[in-house]
Image (tube, rainbow, N blue to C red):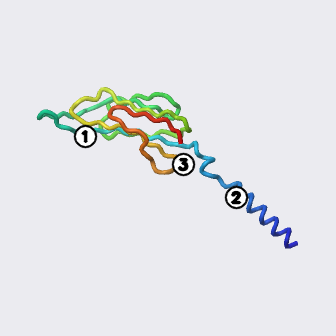
Amino acid sequence: MKKVLMFMTFVLVLLGMASCSDDKDNAGEYYVKYKWHYTQAVYGGGSGVITRATVTYVDADGKKVKVEKVSSGWEVTVGPVKKGFEASLLVEEASGYVIHESTIEVSRNGEPFALKARGELNASYRIDY
């Protein structure tokens, strides 16, 4: 009887371990954070500031979304998306004496966002991990 009880306990432990989810099972749940901002720069004794720009990004369904009259400090998070997702950010109609920065960050399975792409007026990244 003791052997049967030990065997059943062993089987239950194995079943419990098999039912636990592994991070690799959920490896396809990603979130993408798009960011754009600028800092004022001075060139030739003059300075200018952007009052607006048009931002185009790819949403979780793979469609391009255009947002007009965006000011500095803009960001949006989309997801969940799967491995292979093509993230893209494009900033247009931005003018003035400023320094631009566009970034794409990715989070997998609730982990902190990690910087994956950086550019001035555009950035792109294909999720491959």
Q: In this view, does 114 lie to the left or right of 9?
A: left
Residues packed near mark 3 inside 10 Å, few (<14), some (14 to 19) or many (20 plus): some
Q: Which of marks 2 and 3 is nearer the N terminus?
A: 2
- The residue shown at (39%, 34%) is 123
- The residue shown at (70%, 54%) is 19
Query: In what quadrant of the picture does the N terminus appear?
Result: bottom right
Q: What element carries label 2?
A: helix
- Residue 109 image label: 3
Amino acid type, mark 1:
Thr
What residue sits right under mark 2 in the picture? Answer: 17
Tell me residue 46's x, y (percent): 13, 33
Residue that extends furthest to the front in the rendered view of this protein: 128
Amino acid type, mark 3:
Asn
Residues packed near mark 1 inside 10 Å, few (<14), some (14 to 19) or many (20 plus): few
Q: Is mark 3 on a helix, strand or loop?
A: loop
Q: What element carries label 1?
A: strand
Q: Earlier in the sequence, mark 3 or mark 1?
A: 1
Residue that extends furthest to the bottom in the rendered view of this protein: 2
Q: Distance of mark 3 from mark 1, alpha carbons?
A: 32 Å
Tell me residue 110's x, y (percent): 51, 50
Amino acid type, mark 2:
Met
Tell me residue 89's x, y (percent): 40, 32
Q: Give the vertical position of 82 relative to 12 (above or below).
A: above
Q: Distance of mark 2 from mark 3, alpha carbons?
A: 20 Å
Q: Is residue 10 left or right of residue 86?
A: right
What residue sits right under mark 1 in the picture? Answer: 39
Quadrant in which residue 103 is drawn:
top left
Residue that extends furthest to the top in the rendered view of this protein: 93
Residues packed near mark 2 inside 10 Å, few (<14), some (14 to 19) or many (20 plus): few
Quadrant in which residue 28 is drawn:
top right
